Image: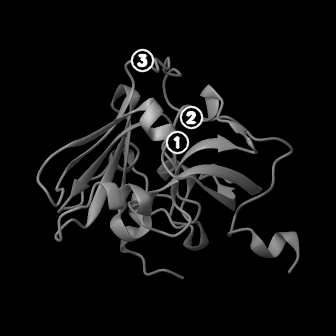
């Protein structure tokens, strides 16, 4: 398979890695930072971990292409962090939880189906390319969902909310596709009524 065969439709490989985000880069304060899981949890309670506790969680490495809705794809990005499946073991969702909302600093959010959140390559990344994430790329913690467009890979993650009913996140409320599969070019909400190609 040639390099072009692994690119989703309409994508190209850039010379570098463009940095795109909405709003300012948050200031990381490790002494007060925490990660919360709440909403439709199995126990009905909220979970929270400090930054040292997140750093102590079992870690995994994932290598995957990174697809931005603005049409660039960065091949073979190496990520390291906590698999979402591990987080769900620590904070189990209720049986009727179908989606998650991933929350970041400044109220930014993205919704995911639970099956996408629990994909075997989805993780909460702390490192990229063998180095700690930089602030521009989402440090200290970034959601990574390699099989979806990158706006679902939320930077500066602070909370995971389990949902029993889907709810649109920041870009989804502003006209982006609810699912975001790059292989079907699910870029915009007007495409949601179209059957996948």
Mark 2 lies on a secondary structure that is loop
Corner quadrant of residue 98: bottom left
User: How far from the left and from the top, in percent, is residue 187?
Assistant: 51, 59
Mark 1 is surrounded, within 10 Å at the Cα level, by few (under 14), some (14 to 19) or many (20 or more) other residues, namely many
User: How far from the left and from the top, in percent, is residue 128?
Assistant: 69, 44
Point 24% across, 55% down: residue: 162
| Mark 1 and mark 2 residues within 8 Å of each other at the beta carbon | yes
The mark closer to the camera, 2 or 3, is 3
Point 43% across, 59% down: residue: 86
Q: Which residue is label 1 attached to? A: 142
Mark 3 is surrounded, within 10 Å at the Cα level, by few (under 14), some (14 to 19) or many (20 or more) other residues, namely few
User: How far from the left and from the top, in percent, is residue 119?
Assistant: 48, 69
User: How far from the left and from the top, in percent, is residue 37?
Assistant: 28, 46
Q: Left or right? Give the position of 37 relative to 119.
A: left
Q: Which residue is label 3 attached to? A: 31
Q: Left or right? Give the position of 98 relative to 6.
A: left
Confirm whether residue 192 shows in the render: yes
Q: Which residue is label 2 attached to? A: 138
> Which quadrant holds the N terminus?
bottom right
The mark closer to the camera, 1 or 3, is 3
- Exactly how many numbered labels are in the figure? 3
Q: Which of 42/102 is in front?
A: 42
């Amino acid at each position: 398979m040639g390099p072009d065969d692994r690119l989703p439709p309409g994508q190209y490989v850039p010379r570098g890695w463009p940095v795109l985000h909405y709003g300012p880069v948050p200031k990381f304060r490790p002494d007060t930072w925490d990660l919360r899981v709440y909403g439709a949890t199995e126990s009905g309670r909220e979970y929270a971990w400090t930054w040292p506790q997140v750093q102590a969680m079992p870690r995994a490495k994932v290598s995957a292409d990174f697809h931005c809705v603005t049409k660039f794809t960065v091949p073979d990005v190496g990520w390291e962090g906590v698999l979402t499946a591990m987080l769900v073991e620590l904070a189990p969702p209720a049986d009727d939880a179908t989606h998650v909302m991933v929350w970041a600093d400044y109220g930014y959010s993205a919704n995911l189906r639970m099956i996408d959140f629990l994909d075997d390559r989805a993780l909460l990344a702390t490192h990229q390319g063998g180095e700690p994430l930089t602030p521009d790329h989402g440090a200290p913690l970034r959601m990574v969902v390699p099989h979806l467009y990158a706006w679902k890979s939320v930077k500066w993650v602070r909370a995971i909310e389990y949902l029993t009913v889907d709810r649109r996140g920041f870009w989804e409320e502003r006209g982006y596709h609810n699912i975001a599969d790059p292989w079907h070019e699910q870029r915009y909400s007007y495409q949601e009524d179209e059957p996948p190609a």
